[in-house]
Image: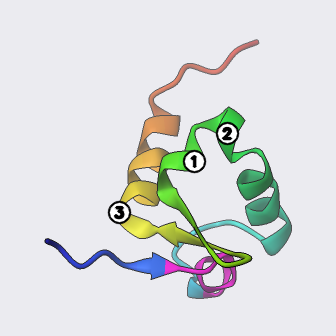
Amino acid sequence: MQNQLYWSPQQIVNSGKYPFTIGQMRYLLLYRHRNGLEKAIRKVGKRLVVRMDLFDSWIESQSSQPLSP
């Protein structure tokens, strides 16, 4: 079994690798069931953590969708 890398939303914001603010991350997590991000989110107790390989895949999948007018 592979070791997966999990980050907190705050770690994602502080990393500088992703262009999200903490408010944007909270919004994405709140609506994860609607936006397709639920596969990358794990709930540990009361905390939400993000599986980074699935998060990166989700970001890439967003760019392939055409913009609606």
**In-image side of 2 versus 12 (left or right):** left
- The amino acid type, in three-letter code, at marker 3 is Asp
* Disc 2 and disc 3 in contact, CB within 8 angstroms: no
Task: Name the residue at the left extreme.
Answer: 1
Q: Which quarter of the rendered picture does the C terminus lie within? A: top right
Q: Residue at x 53, y 68 (%)?
A: 50
Q: Which residue is mark 1?
A: 38
Give residue 40's position: percent from left, percent from top.
Answer: 49, 56
Q: Residue at x 45, y 78 (%)?
A: 6
Task: Name the residue at the front extreme.
Answer: 45
Q: Nearer the viewer, mark 3 or mark 1?
A: 1
Residue 30 magenta: no
* Disc 1 and disc 2 in contact, CB within 8 angstroms: yes
Span of residues in magenta: 7-14
Q: CA distance from mark 1 to mark 2?
A: 5 Å
| Numbered disc 3: secondary structure | helix
Q: Which quarter of the rendered picture does the N terminus lie within? A: bottom left
The count of marks equals 3
Give residue 29's position: percent from left, percent from top.
Answer: 72, 57
Q: Which residue is mark 2?
A: 33
Q: Which residue is mark 3?
A: 53
Q: Quadrant of residue 68?
A: top right
| Numbered disc 2: secondary structure | helix
Q: CA distance from mark 2 to mark 3?
A: 18 Å
Q: CA distance from mark 3 to mark 1?
A: 13 Å
Give the mark nearer the N terminus: 3 vs 1.
1
